[in-house]
Amino acid sequence: MPAASAAPGSPAGTKRTRDAAAPSGNTPATIRRRAGRPSSAVLDKAGITAAALDLISRNGYDGLTMAGLARLLDVAPSALYNHVTSKQDVLLLVEDHLAALVDVSGFGAGSWEDAVRTWAWSYRDVFAQHTPLIPVIAVLPVTDAPQTLAMYETVSRGFLDAGFPQERIVSSIVALESFIFGSAYDVTAPADIFDAGSMAGSTPHFTAAVQTLAEQGHERPADAAFRLGLEALIAGLGALRG
Amino acid sequence: MPAASAAPGSPAGTKRTRDAAAPSGNTPATIRRRAGRPSSAVLDKAGITAAALDLISRNGYDGLTMAGLARLLDVAPSALYNHVTSKQDVLLLVEDHLAALVDVSGFGAGSWEDAVRTWAWSYRDVFAQHTPLIPVIAVLPVTDAPQTLAMYETVSRGFLDAGFPQERIVSSIVALESFIFGSAYDVTAPADIFDAGSMAGSTPHFTAAVQTLAEQGHERPADAAFRLGLEALIAGLGALRG
DNA sequence: ACCACTAAATGAATGTCATTCATTTATTAG
DNA sequence: CTAATAAATGAATGACATTCATTTAGTGGT
């Protein structure tokens, strides 16, 4: 790699020779470390994941920027790219971390029904706090997410033990998961999402139904819908066991 | 609004007096029209929606940029902001347009079960092509989306006529919708999403289940899961009618 | 001890966006 | 005829993610 041949896209005029070497100031990690060190690296995937979760918990997913991540880790933004290939990659790390928080302890313990209930509610609750990850999961090859894969293994095992025929296990899990992801969005919906406002006059049946729910519902609407759908799925899928 | 007091944040040096008035060239809409005209406006919500759909159909949601929209409409990007307040607003227009494509014709015609089946499959199919809108819908107050609201009205009416008690109608619809949105993502998932790759050894039950599905499944996996879950929901929810 | 190798960091671009703002213009209402 | 107004312009702005040439400091081999 000869330094001679100027890279195709590089600007001709301004040379990159460190003239003035930055007016001093102390840019991020100037104190803690002079430069890279093969072992005992400041940055690694675990640290990046932790920092990302920290940022998200503070300001939500809008607060998760590569620059913010770098600042929190006391490093230049470009340094992150030695450890992850893209921001999507960071999201993936976060997703896999969260998968480990989902409660699969019911499988192998009580009934299949109870195990699914525990799993589904906890799965929904975890991702309701992280809905921006849902589009990521939906397309994420499981190979890249070991914890997620581990969750699938436990759940699959539970379905098999409960008497599900092989060929229906994946479809059943996918159906439940689809419902769970969709329901995670509901949790974040504003309370007045179904308020028809000025259009209420032209939608009497819907408006009445919304009204009744608001008056009679004890649970949060999102919880009531989730319970209803989940019990239907458990009953319907469970009926197809061998 | 006196032009005297300089706006607080405006740059001091460079005045914005049209000196040179652009070297000529013909920028976008130079020919078709000199400038704004109260009526017979070039731009309106319908036109913006149509152009947005055009862009999306060409290059997907990555292709939908305010600049691209403006180019297609032969207008400066900033002109769009006279008609929509933000890009989110454009997405909303698109969403509501799509809601009108969902098939609700079954309600009022055949059985409740068949009506739900028709509605659910068509709803899923429409939004499978537009998954980036799902996060938008989830938070969108229905007031701002008349077509979407109209869909809810028809569906609510169908549930009521089928004997559903008032207080369970909205929850039932939300449960179905959650499942539909989650399932829309599945449709777009890569075929090898469940390929455990190098981790396959540590996840025998899951891997076997995936294998079996691949060998024995006739339908697309996403369709099999959707059918399974939808039938379970229809059976489970239908059982709760009065 | 030296030295070549390499992982890891820097900081200065780049390019893509959405969005804002002061102006200008053409139509329309009074 | 004139004042008001809706609608357009184009030039900034400010976030971003991402790339690249370069520098630095440990490490392993001799």
Image (cartoon, coloured by chain):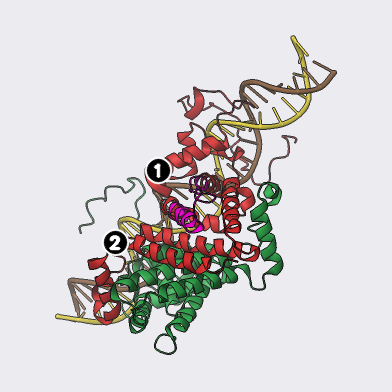
Chain colours: A red, B green, C yellow, D brown
Residue at 34% over, 68% down = B82
Disc 1 on helix, strand or loop?
Answer: helix
Residues marked 1 and 2, same chain: yes
N-terminal-most mark, 1 or 2: 1
Locate the N terminus of chain A by quadrant.
top right
Chain of residue at mark 2: A
Distance of label 1 from label 2 (alpha carbons): 22 Å
Looking at the picture, how far across and down is residue B169, in whole percent? 34, 74
Check residue A191 in the rendering and tell me which mark sits there, or answer none: 2
Q: Which kind of residue does numbered mark 2 sit on? A: Ala
Residue at 57% over, 67% down = B187
Looking at the picture, how far across and down is residue A234, in whole percent? 48, 64
Left/right of residue B131 with respect to residue A169 in the rendered view: left
Disc 2 on helix, strand or loop?
Answer: loop
Q: Is residue C27 above or below residue D7?
A: below
Q: Is residue A90 above or below residue A207?
A: above
Looking at the picture, how far across and down is residue B114, in whole percent? 47, 83
- Which image quadrant is residue A131 in? bottom left
Q: Is residue B9 above or below residue A174?
A: above
Q: What residue would you read off at disc 1?
A: A57
Q: Is residue A193 magenta?
A: no
Task: Write the start and end of the magenta stretch as one range.
Answer: A98-123
User: Is there any visible trace of residue A63 in the rendered image?
Assistant: yes
Q: Which kind of residue does numbered mark 1 sit on? A: Ser
